[in-house]
């Protein structure tokens, strides 16, 4: 207890905590979007429960990964297989599988949105609650690796990492309902969110092959696209009022 008090008495530790918390929240946006899109397939009364369970699972997974941080940083980056002169570690394999999953899921969802009315035969099958939870767990694992690697790069103390992860999850838990409702209410924003996840999938696959692309560019592009779409929505709303 004394060590913790002494640790947080240092200004640089607080700066590290604030910086890491903000970064964890930014990196968690794609996770919240994915959870919102997946849970929207459930009945209304189950959606909030699934969202909370998904974010709590994400928190548990990240804390578990933090507890074995030295193993993640060192062992999982060691090559385990070589294909066509390209070495792959367990981390690369996990990122590749997660990227393919995002590409598949996003493509199916976009196709469903665009072609739903043309091919709606009344036989649509809604996923079960635990099927959705399983999808959330799988993608939580992939996103957690990204989050933990960032935490290691920005902070030196495990306690600071744990507190930052908890803070970011509490913030996302608080705003997840509002984000989910907003995405559900506006199909164009949902399409943008799916395009964003599609892009993240491509980046994960590229990173598994050692091609690192800073996600800051993607987040900025997504933010810019959302701002433009919000302005379009405002213009359409004003146009309807004039009519």
Image: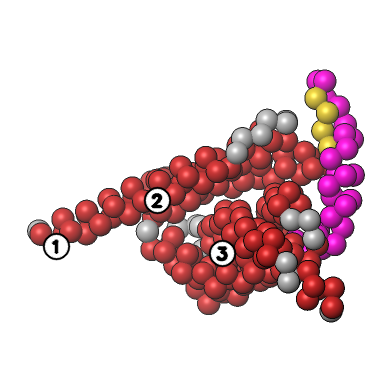
Percent x, y for residue 48?
Answer: 55, 74
Q: Secondary structure at mark 2?
A: helix
Establish if 215 lies above or below 170.
above
Q: Which disc, if any, is residue 39? A: 3
Q: Secondary structure at mark 1?
A: helix
Number of numbered discs visible in the structure rendering: 3
The quarter of the image holding the N terminus is bottom right
In front of the other: label 3 or label 1?
1
User: Between 139 and 5, which is closer to the camera in this rendering?
Assistant: 5
Residue at mark 1 to residue at mark 2: CA–CA distance: 23 Å
- Residue 242 location, quadrant: bottom left
Residue that numbered label 2 is attached to: 226
Percent x, y for residue 54?
Answer: 65, 66
- State the predominant SS element of the stretch in magenta: helix
| Badge 2 or badge 3: first in the primary sequence | 3
The magenta stretch spans residue 65:
yes
Establish if 97 lies above or below 49.
above
180 to the left or right of 147: left
The magenta stretch spans residue 45:
no
Percent x, y for residue 100?
Answer: 66, 40
């Amino acid at each position: 207890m004394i060590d913790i008090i002494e640790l947080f008495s240092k200004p640089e530790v607080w700066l590290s905590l604030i910086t890491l918390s903000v970064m964890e929240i930014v990196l968690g946006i794609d996770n919240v979007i994915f959870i919102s899109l997946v849970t929207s397939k459930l009945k209304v009364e189950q959606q909030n429960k699934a969202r909370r369970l998904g974010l709590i699972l994400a928190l548990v997974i990240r804390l578990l990964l933090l507890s074995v941080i030295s193993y993640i940083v060192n062992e999982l980056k060691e090559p385990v297989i070589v294909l066509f002169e390209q070495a792959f570690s367990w981390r690369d394999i996990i990122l590749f599988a997660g990227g393919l999953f995002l590409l598949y899921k996003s493509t199916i969802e976009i196709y469903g949105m665009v072609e739903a009315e043309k091919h709606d035969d009344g036989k649509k099958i809604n996923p079960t609650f635990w099927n959705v939870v399983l999808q959330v767990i799988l993608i939580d694992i992939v996103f957690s690796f990204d989050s933990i690697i960032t935490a290691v790069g920005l902070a030196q103390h495990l306690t600071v990492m744990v507190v930052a992860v908890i803070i970011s999850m509490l913030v996302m838990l608080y705003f997840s309902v509002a984000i989910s409702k907003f995405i559900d209410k506006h199909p164009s924003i949902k399409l943008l969110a799916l395009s964003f996840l599609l892009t993240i999938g491509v980046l994960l696959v590229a990173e598994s092959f050692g091609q690192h692309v800073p996600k800051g560019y993607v987040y900025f592009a997504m933010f810019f696209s959302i701002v433009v779409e919000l302005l379009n929505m405002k213009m359409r709303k004003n146009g309807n009022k004039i009519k």
